[in-house]
Image: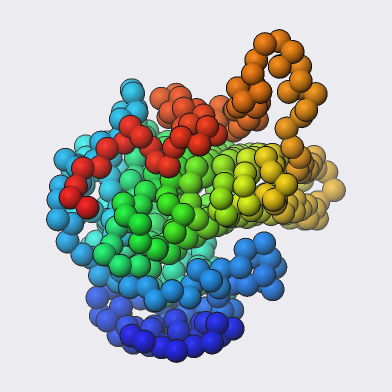
Amino acid sequence: MSVLVDKADLSLKYTAHYNEVKESLQKESADVLNAPRNKAFQDFVMQGIPTRKNENYKYTNLQPQFFPEYRFMHRREPVKLDLHAAFRCDVPQLDTHLAFIFNGWYYEDNKQAGQLPEGVILESLEKIAREKPELLKKYATLAKTEEDPLVALNTAFAKDGYFLYVPKNTVVDKPIQLINFLQANEDAFVTQRNFIVVEEGADAKIVSCDHTLNLNTYLSNSVTEVFVGANANFEYYTLQNEHNKTTSLNSVFVHQEKDSKATTLYSSLHGGVIRNNLRFILDGENAEAHLYGMAFLDKKQHVDNFTQVIHAKPNCMSNQIYKNVLNDESNGAFAGRIHVIRDAQKTNAFQRNNNLLLTDKATMQTKPQLIIDADDVKCSHGATVGQIDEEALFYMRARGIDEDKARLMMMNAFAHEVVQQISIEPLRDRIDELVDKRLKGEVARCHECAYNCDC
């Protein structure tokens, strides 16, 4: 397809593409995925590709990322090798249930999915939509297409991703590790849709690792809906480690019932443009949400973390800590919004964003926000942007530590507050090592992860 458009009206390009493929999207997908498709695209047309004029995207102009001529990955393409034989994640003592996602499609031969506890389902979203659509009755109810154009575009194009179901009172004995690969022979646009249900009293942990396998330009638009039942626990750790020609757009929506606990932690070690959009709804008393993030940027990389936590019921707690280390001409952004609904009394909500600038050309925009409609709450928010403390640096050098090592020690200490929130000890140790290497400028990918192919 070749469509000449003005950059100012780039959405016309995507409108033309949708009109070209919508019949095949409908024909090749199950009813539950098709139901919101046309409305979602109309919502996208109404909003357009986000620019800085969009309040929720005021720090990230995505128009340049949508301009290249991508090949859209609307169909499952054969993987020419056994990913289980080709890939090895060498993290000592990290024992996981391993599954692969390839260009947004659930790998058809995920061997370890069958070893999960009885009743737990880890499967292709496309397959579940066809064979067990009743499990997707809440599909597209959390991710509102009228509120975000990226969510709308994802819903319009969605065909596959992963589906996770953890039944009542089931504890998944070890973390589920999802390896997201991007690899194509040309620049590619990838759409991935995920759906997670953790029922009452259940417990599950996900470790998601994002990798690019060659140097083509990629735009990945991913949406994940998560339902956490009463008294359930859900932990979601994401390691973003992709090359500088990758645009990674991630939207995660979490609905929590009473007495539940949900934790997300994003480690952005490498990537060109990264946008992480999280929205939590605490919809039951005594629900607890923890949102953590850290990013390490250099060159002209850009990472934007946008969070919304909605306290809808009384006696709930949320905690947010995001930290960034920025070098060279990199740019970071954080916008965090806490909204306490009128009847959500006895709310405890905390939010903090700390940023370390290593050069005069690095920039950081931060906007913590509180919207409080209740009158009996404890809420706080704050942000700092600064450079390495020269007095502390002098103190360390006076005790025989050379300047480079002293700076590294201080940066590691700065990041460690987020790292220590990882409850999986082997993963915590590995992230500590990767952060250390990233700060030394030694790592562009997980060195101990091996992917053997002819590419």
State whether residue 13 is above or below residue 436: below
- Indicate the position of residue 387 as horizontal and vertical percent values: 74, 37
- Which residue extends farthest top? 399
* Residue 119 at least partly seen: no
User: Residue at coordinates 39% horizontally, 41% vertically from top-left?
Assistant: 445
User: Residue at coordinates 30% horizontally, 85% vertically from top-left?
Assistant: 23
Quadrant the N terminus occupies: bottom left
Q: Is 445 situated left or right of 125 in this image?
A: right
Q: Quadrant of residue 99?
A: top left
- Indicate the position of residue 383 as horizontal and vertical percent values: 76, 43
**Closest to the observer: 201 or 444?**
444
Colouring chosen for the image of the structure: rainbow
User: Residue at coordinates 63% horizontally, 30% vertically from top-left?
Assistant: 411
**Closest to the observer: 124 or 13?**
13
- Indicate the position of residue 348 as horizontal and vertical percent values: 73, 39
**Closest to the observer: 254 or 16?**
16
- Indicate the position of residue 74 as horizontal and vertical percent values: 30, 71
Q: Quadrant of residue 285?
A: top right
State whether residue 313 is above or below residue 140: above
State whether residue 19 is above or below residue 303: below
Q: Is 125 situated left or right of 58 in this image?
A: left
Q: Is 31 situated left or right of 233 in this image?
A: left
User: Residue at coordinates 48% horizontally, 46% vertically from top-left?
Assistant: 270
* Residue 419 at least partly seen: yes
**Closest to the observer: 247 or 277?**
247
State whether residue 251 is above or below residue 258: below
